[in-house]
Amino acid sequence: MQTLNLAGGCLFVNVQASSYAVGAAQGIFADSQKQKQLLAVLSPRNSTIEFPNAASTADADIAFVIPLAARDEEVGVLFLSQKVSRQSFSSDDIYLLQGLASAAASGMRSAMLVRDVSVRDTFVSIASHELRSPLTAIMGYADLLLHRNPPDATRKRWLENIIDSGQRITDLVRDLLDVSRIHAGKVVMKLERVKLCDVLDEQMTIVREYSDNHTFVLEVAPDVPDALIDRDKFGQAIGNLLSNAVKYSPCGGRVILSARHDSQRHRVVVSVSDQGIGISRADRDSLFTTFHRIQRPETKGIRGIGLGLYTVREWIEAMGGEVWLKSELNKGSVFSVAVPAYGTVATAKKLHAVQRTR
Ligand code: ADP
């Protein structure tokens, strides 16, 4: 699902097979109660909706619900909030809205088509390219094992290489499947009450295995509450940030995984910091998009396909959370994610809004 949050409280909601979903924590619709009302406006709706449809009966803050149709295909819906001044919309405003809706519809349709084609092509080329080298390694070592009779130590090394290559293929297929599920809107979030220190501990234990070159520190503040998250996906997201912290600090250093309570916003903030190569300001914008890898002499030879951060952000946002980054070139980076704390009124409502098929 794609949502575009415009200043003034507009929201595009993508349509999938006649079903609608509203992004969590988006602008004026961050209020989960309001999200429910929006979905209620949409569900009984049929395609003969008048344009623009006055929706203020559903919620006083919403002025219009406007279907976005291009070539008879409904590609989205535009919600429009009331004017800040609360004045009614003039005929000029409506005229402008009609033009905007029609331009937005064809723009969205083209963007969706271009994205589908280019993502599919990129998928195929990256998958085949990245699969080739571990598959060649597996075939090569298996062939050697079959036809030679090496000493035990060599046999062990060859078998370890086969396992390592098999793991790379498994990871690659998992990453591609995760992204294709996100694109198809088929991610299911199983939100539940989770004790964060258990998940962080598990991920720390895994990442310690990756490197003898780094010092790993886990800092969980004593007042960190339980969180309302999808345990597996959250664990995978933190694991991803930790493995990046190791990968992109090839000279070693400290990797700190920390958790604190943001009591004002009823959420838990988890951060992963490293003392690695850092990320320049210019490179940050496209960091969370698919297949994006920063090309620098320092990243040469570091394995990856540029799907990790994209998946992290999609999942964390689907849990009602947020991801951000602070970094200084050649000094290190801190990636932070905030997720809802369990037990607040806000998160209890959010559970209803987010627990859905995306
Ligand atoms: P991958 O690591 O597979 O390339 P990611 O989506 O996880 O894909 O990361 C995208 C890019 O962001 C990486 O290629 C790298 O250039 C940059 N990056 C991610 N994490 C860090 C980090 N901790 N320090 C420096 N650069 C990073």
Image: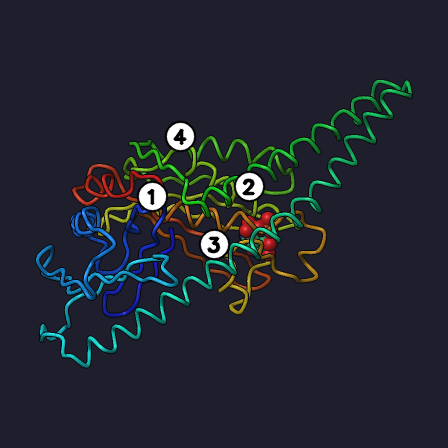
Q: Residue at x 41, y 67 (%)?
A: 107
User: Residue under circle 4?
Assistant: 198
Label 3 SS: strand
Q: Residue at x 23, y 69 (%)?
A: 8
Marks 3/2 in contact by CB < 8 Å: the verdict is: no
Residue farthest along the right direction in this orientation? 148
User: Residue under circle 1?
Assistant: 319
Calculate the distance from the C-alpha at mark 4 to the C-alpha at mark 2: 24 Å
Question: Is tag 3's residue or tag 2's residue first in the polypeptide sequence?
Answer: 2
User: Residue under circle 2?
Assistant: 175
Marks 1/4 in contact by CB < 8 Å: the verdict is: no
Calculate the distance from the C-alpha at mark 1 to the C-alpha at mark 3: 21 Å
Q: Position of residue 282 (x, y in %)?
A: 53, 69
Residue 31 higher or lower than 180, as above or below: below
Q: Position of residue 11 (x, y in %)?
A: 28, 61
User: Residue under circle 3?
Assistant: 334
Q: Position of residue 37 (x, y in %)?
A: 16, 50
Q: Residue at x 60, y 37 (%)?
A: 171
Q: Quadrant of residue 102?
A: bottom left
Q: Position of residue 292 (x, y in %)?
A: 57, 57
Q: Which mark is residue 223?
A: none
Question: Is tag 4's residue or tag 2's residue first in the polypeptide sequence?
Answer: 2
Amino acid, disc 2:
Asp
Residue 278 higher or lower than 35, as above or below: below
Question: Is tag 2's residue or tag 1's residue first in the polypeptide sequence?
Answer: 2
Q: Mark 3 or mark 2, which is nearer to you?
A: 2
Residue 276 in view (yes/no): no
Amino acid, disc 1:
Met
Amino acid, disc 4:
Asp
Calculate the distance from the C-alpha at mark 3 to the C-alpha at mark 4: 21 Å
Mark 2, ligand 1, within 8 Å: the answer is yes
- Neighbour class for label 1 at 10 Å: few (<14), some, many (≥20)? many
